[in-house]
Image (cartoon, rainbow, N blue to C red):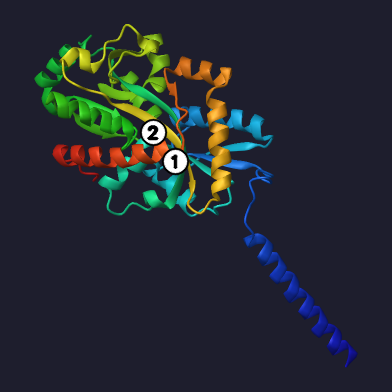
Amino acid sequence: MCKAKSVFTQQIFRSIAACISCFLMGAPVLASDWPNQPVRLISPFPAGGTADILSRSLGQELSEQWKQTIVVENKVGAGGAVAASQVARARPDGYTMLMVSGSMLTVNPNLYKDLPYRVGDFKNVSIVSIGPFVVATNKKVPANNLAELLSYIGQNKSAVNFGSSGVGSQTHMASEMLMHVTGSKMTHIPYSGETLALTDLIAGQIQVVTGNLAALMPFIKSGDVKAIAVTSSERSSALADVPTVKEQINKEFDAQGWFGVVVPKGTPDDIVQKMEQGIATAMVSERMKKKFQDLGLTAAEQGQEYMTQKITNELASWKTIIAEQKINPK
């Protein structure tokens, strides 16, 4: 009898312990206690690309601020959809952050019907950087300015190939925007990352890339590729001798890529605010200013409100270009 009572008592204690454990696991995370363990910062593109460089630079700054390890993980695939879908399903406790390219939240929702994530799956934290693209060619392409490149494209029709970091990526859409405005036509060759596209550009497998300035800069400096035009409305201080598309075609043209940080929806607002403040502080550090200057990027100090409005505006504008250019993801 006593033995039976003892077993029964143990079962009760186990049940109580399990309930307490579940309660603690479900308890809200307080910003005052956060972060008390390593934070993951997911980069959706391969190592060496702009998103990866930004993630590691920002991670270093935040790690020093928060006195906690920031683990950068590359989750590559499907134009960022692999990383985005994983983060969308992650526990909203402030320990999973995602570095997004603008296209992941403004182009892909317009382009893919079966996208495994939605814009509403995330809370915006802050845009991290904004920067122009560079229209670049293999060094053997007989063009040194945009007029000569457009002439070369016209003479060779669709035999001229342009590479990008994937269908719907910022580098893809920048080229589509260029073709839309100039009436030119090239054949799109999508890659699973910008570094792979640049490798084939240097090798001559493709002729053109409209790529992130940060990723292209080392190859422009080495002479492995030629910089034909900058896509921002003003020249970049990093490539002051390279004229803009706007200058060369005498039409309005402004295409810039951006990267920002989001977290799973449901992440407590006070933690998101602490993240936003941390990023703002990181952006004005001398080390980050130097890093961004070297990369030809502009550090963005805009937070949640600005990022949300920018996504809303670009969702509408890219929808128009996708329809007019008849861009098919397949």
Q: Is residue 7 left or right of residue 26?
A: right
Viewer-proximal residue, 41 or 281? 281
Amino acid type, label 2: Gly
Circle 2 — which element? Answer: loop
Residue 169 lies, in percent from the top left, at: 32, 36
Residue 44, compared with residue 164, is above or below; it is below
Residue 260 lies, in percent from the top left, at: 44, 35
Label 2 sits on residue: 193
| Residue at 65% over, 60% down | 25
Residue 162 lies, in percent from the top left, at: 25, 27
Residue 259 - label: none
Q: Residue furthest bottom?
A: 1
Count of residue discs: 2
Viewer-proximal residue, 35 or 56? 35
| Residue at 64% over, 50% down | 30
Label 1 sits on residue: 76
Q: Are marks 2 and 1 in contact (CB under 8 Å)?
A: yes
Q: Is residue 107 left or right of residue 15?
A: left
Amino acid type, label 1: Val
Q: Is residue 192 visible?
A: no
Q: Is residue 326 visible?
A: yes
Residue 139 lies, in percent from the top left, at: 29, 12
